[in-house]
Amino acid sequence: MILNLPLSYANLRNIFVLGMGISSVANTIPRPKIEARSPTLYTPVAFGLGAAPLIDSLQPYSGTSVTLDSSTPVLTLDYAADVAGFPYFEVTSLIGSATQIELKYSEQFNGLKLDSGDGPWYLTPTILAVLYTNGLSNSFRTETFNITTSGKTESFFIQGGQRWQTMELLSNTSVTISNIGFRASVEINPSDTLVGSFSASNDVYDGLWSLGARAVQASCVEADSQPSTWEISGDGALIRGQYPGTSALGMNYGDYTMSFSTKISRGGTGWRVAAGPNAGYGAYFVLTSNGPQYLSTDNATVPSDSLITTYGFSIVNFYLSSAPPLYYANPFPILDNEWYRVSTAITPSGYNISVNDTQFAFVPYTTFLPYVNAGFGGTELITTGSWGFGPFQDQAAYVKDVEVIGQDSTVLYTNSFTSTDILAEYLVASNAYAVCLDGAKRDREIWIGDFSHTAKELAASTGRYDFIESMIEFTFAGQFTSGPAAGIVPMQDSMGSAPEYQSVYYPSQYGETDYELFFLLTLGDYYALTSNTAFLSKYWNGTKLLVDAMLTYLDPSTGLLANSSASWFTAQGQQNATAPTALFATSLQQLAIVATALQDPTTAAHYTALSANLSTAINTQLWNPTLGAYSTALTNGVRESDTSVLATAFTIRAGIANSSQATSAVQALDSLFYLIGYKDSTAVGNSATTQLSPNVQGFLLESLFLAYTQSNVTAEVVVPVLHNLLDVYWPRMLNQNEYFTGASWEYVYADGSPGIGMFTSLCHPWGARRRMF
């Protein structure tokens, strides 16, 4: 598709017709035939050699051999945009008997300057809902290799998304390296080769379209393309340094003794007890050996021949709520490649750790209690919760013969760890479905609400409807069909899990109730894109069951969505809010069309009536003439004095706002504009850390075109907002080399930098513009 039009009043309708038409055009384009491909290799486009990471004066890279020595120990590699896969390199010559090389990865350049790369993803206090998980990838953004011979070396782990990489020589030797890159774990093709494409006379607009095209390619993974991070054999599970996998079977167990046999292959072994369903938040222990350590090891953080204990997510502060680690010297040496029996007893006052029946430490609960975050389960997690396994960075150990014994000597659990059947239980099974992740680097989880953006981006770029269908199939496979959660589908799921374990994570990982509504929206969008009734008919009963579940959240006194057990992401957690109720209305409108296509007129009439009732409830209670916009929510039956972007966007999309209301609401967006973009709500203050969400503004962008074409809002009203989005806000993802990844971002600060600092995902489909083009 070629677009040679300036963003002007006169051409706004033409832009809309050409842009939005991609959805219907995509229906007529044959879907690409997916064939087995030889492994793709992503190689750098430029490199630099020096004493520190370089961003300027890089040279083109074409497999050139590079020598690292004491004067130039750091090789900087630039892949031009985010890539993903298994890192590899080839050593062509080596001076000395062995050398150690540290690889570091980052989406933004400044991560290369940090000891940990752009990980291991420290958390700011404002983003406590994002949980750190295994993600079938390397939990760390640095890794060290001990090289003793020439030849090719490949990492065991996937690195999910990075533009930048360094290789640093740690030892006082010299090594020549060639053929560096990543064996691909996803297939990323240039945007101009995709089924859907876009071209404009404005190069910036070309670049903006490509952001989403790359983000979905890097974040959507084929079935079985992300292998398990555990290796199972007759010796048990070989577990390399990673975020621990936690059993789904022991979340309600307490006051038990967990024992396992372990053999350290390198550095140490790690485990959990009393771990909750929120990414295994709980007590964590690392037992280190007296064997040789890598030169990159921080001996103050991970001393040899020691027991390290903490509470939270890791011994380094992944999350601000993690407790400072405690250190205990081992009573006797722990040797590499020797089997030991480790036991951890949860006693009335602390954790009692023993090795081969010798006590190594007693850790009182009082040490950890001040650091326990109630948001992750409360203080009961001190003694109640499951167990898990995962050594720390660059460590590796075997684990087998796990046994859990209750206080009354009852055997609660036993497993030899010699069968791959355990992998899904510990959330580390290979992905059985083709799925789209929230982000390439993080979160490498399946958030069904965020997929609402991704599905349309897939349709408009890669044409991979099979990903959309697989996501729908995956989501319904985990639907609850009975009990208090009947109808609910997984809101946040892990690739490495399985449907039979879904109930374990309810309700702790179902904290955004309107994500269920976004899934309903995706079902309607899928039909609008494909008219595929044969596929949707398989899930029609499940769809109706989910709608019924959502109806239980309606407040009978207001007719709006409100329930003490619900939290609404689209309304900053408020009840009786405009945005989620309007989102439900839109979903029902679309599903009524699906019902008609499926020859279910009763359901079609029911959904049409429900949508009309929701629209009336919003208009009569939440339109605020003083604001000239919809209030964010009702408080004690009174309209709030705040409005939000999504209150405007969703009421326009649902057709709730009439022409006058839509015009006024778009004009009122001026009160939300801050420096480069729109704040989620007028309740959000202005500061250096104000988040300007591309997710939210993506919904706004779509609604502006609908306002113009369907609500008769004039170009004079719409174009200034479009200008702010397309010429001011999104270009920040293009025009800053140190942050550019070729993909859309998760969040943006008002100064145009990544919006959660180093933690920000810079390859996040929810940050791309929706089906505009």
Image: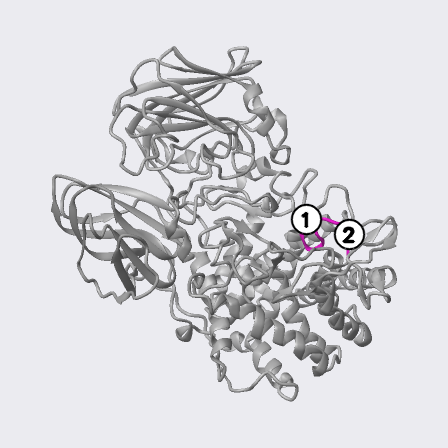
On the rendered structure, is 357 left or right of 464? left
* In-front residue for pair 664/47: 47
Instruction: Report the residue at 72% width, 56% height from top.
Output: 580
Q: What residue type is labelled 1?
A: Thr
> Circle 2 — which element?
loop
Q: Residue most toward the bottom? A: 10
Specify whether residue 370 is in view: yes
Q: Position of residue 427 (x, y in %)?
A: 46, 39
Compared with 69, 505 (above or below) is: above
In the image, residue 491 above or below residue 527: above
Q: Identify the magenta region.
A: 568-577
Q: Nearer the viewer, residue 440 or 559?
A: 440
Looking at marks 1 and 2 on the same chain, the residue that comes earlier in the sequence is marked by 1
Residues marked 1 and 2 touching at CB (< 8 Å) = yes
Instruction: Please name the residue that numbered disc 2 is placed on.
Output: 561
- The reply to whether the magenta stretch includes residue 552 is no
